[in-house]
Image (tube, rainbow, N blue to C red):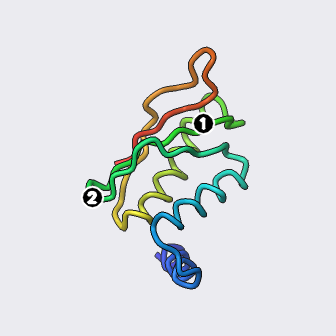
Amino acid sequence: SSIKKDICDYAQKLGSTDVGMLNILAEVFETFGLGHMEIIDLDNRKKACIARIHNSPLNGKADGLICPAVLSGMFSFLFSKDVEAKKASSKLKGMNYSEYVIK
C-alpha cells in the first residue's frame, strides 16, 4: 500500500534499524494518546511480540478495537509480514496495563 511505502521511505531517510523504528513507533503510539507501550518479548525470527500498554485512556470496547488495530499495523510493518494483535489480558485490579500477543 502507499502508506506502507511512505513509512518505509521515512524509515530509510532516518537510517533507522528495526529497533530504532520500534522506539519511534512506541513514541508515536504515546504521542497519539494511546498509552505507553512496553515490549515484554520480541522475536524477530518468529515474527512475534508481547506488548503491554500502560495508562491507556481507552477503556472497554475502544481498548479492544483501537489498540489491537494500531499494534497489528505497527508490527506488520516492522516484521514485513501481516500479523494480528490479540488482547491476552485486561487491566487487572491494581494493574494499569493491558497485554497483547502479536503474531
- Residue 63 is tagged as 1
The answer to whether residue 28 is above or below residue 38 is below
The reply, left or right, for residue 33 in relation to residue 50 is right
Question: Residue 98 occupies which quadrant of the picture?
Answer: top right
Q: Which three-letter amino acid code belongs to the residue tagged 1?
A: Asp
Q: Quadrant of residue 81?
A: bottom left
Circle count? 2
> Observer-nearest residue: 68 or 47?
47
- Residue 43 rendering spot, x and y as whole percentages: 33, 52
Image coordinates for residue 50, horizontal then vertical, percent = 42, 42
Q: Position of residue 46 (x, y in %)?
A: 26, 54
Residue drawn where x is 36% and y is 54% of the image: 83
Q: CA distance from mark 1 to mark 2?
A: 28 Å
Q: Nearer the N terminus, badge 1 or badge 2?
A: 2
Determine the image quadrant of residue 96: top right
Foreground residue among 80 and 14: 14
Q: Position of residue 92 (x, y in %)?
A: 56, 19
- State whether residue 16 is above or below residue 69: below
Q: Which residue in the structure is indicated by mark 2?
A: 45
Residue pictured at 60% horizontal, 36% vertical = 63
- Mark 1 vs mark 2: in front: 2
